[in-house]
Image (spheres, rainbow, N blue to C red):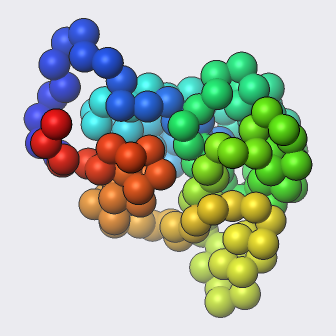
Amino acid sequence: MQGDEPQGSAPRGIILIVEDNELNLKLLKDILDFQGYSTVVTDLGAAAFDLARQHHPDLILLDIQLPDVSGIEVARRLKADEQTRAIPIIAVTAFAMPGDRTTVLDSGCDDYISKPFNIREFLALVGRYTETPAGADS
């Protein structure tokens, strides 16, 4: 992590985080906030639909195991909706069995990263979808 973002600088993009584990949510939010992204968070899959329509995020980070609706169902619904289908979705999940990746990607997720993840790899993946690679000079 390079350094603090200048006060008043424009955010690098808006990222919707859908994660029900408080520690994981805090980690994701802190990493992204530090890198200059604006974050919107929820711990419920059902809320992701309204938040995605309201905030038009540049990227959605989606846990697969949620308390109300599975992340797979959330991804399917988001990709079926005209207002949200173009938003890239990265599954951030502990499901790391060989068939899990295929199931997650088939649901409409654009990419997949398993927990625990390497922060540099995570930021590179986020940067690929927000077109602002971490550490890139402007």
Residue in front for this viewpoint, 33 or 116: 33
Q: Is residue 45 visible?
A: no
Residue 66 spot, x, y in % from top left? 76, 51
Q: Is residue 14 visible?
A: yes
Side of 112 relative to 10 (left or right): right
Residue for point 24% across, 10% down: 8
Residue for point 66% across, 78% down: 101
Residue for point 19% across, 12% down: 7
From what the image shows, is residue 64 above or below residue 23? below
Residue 14 spot, x, y in % from top left? 50, 30
Residue 65 spot, x, y in % from top left? 74, 58
Which quadrant would the C terminus be assigned to in this image?
A: top left
Check the image and name the residue furthest to the top.
Answer: 8
Residue for point 63% across, 62% down: 110
Give residue 78's quadrant in the image: top right
From what the image shows, is residue 76 above or below residue 32? below
Side of 22 relative to 80 (left or right): left
Residue 12 spot, x, y in % from top left? 36, 31
Side of 25 relative to 123 (left or right): right
User: Could you tell me how many numbered marks the image carries?
Assistant: 0
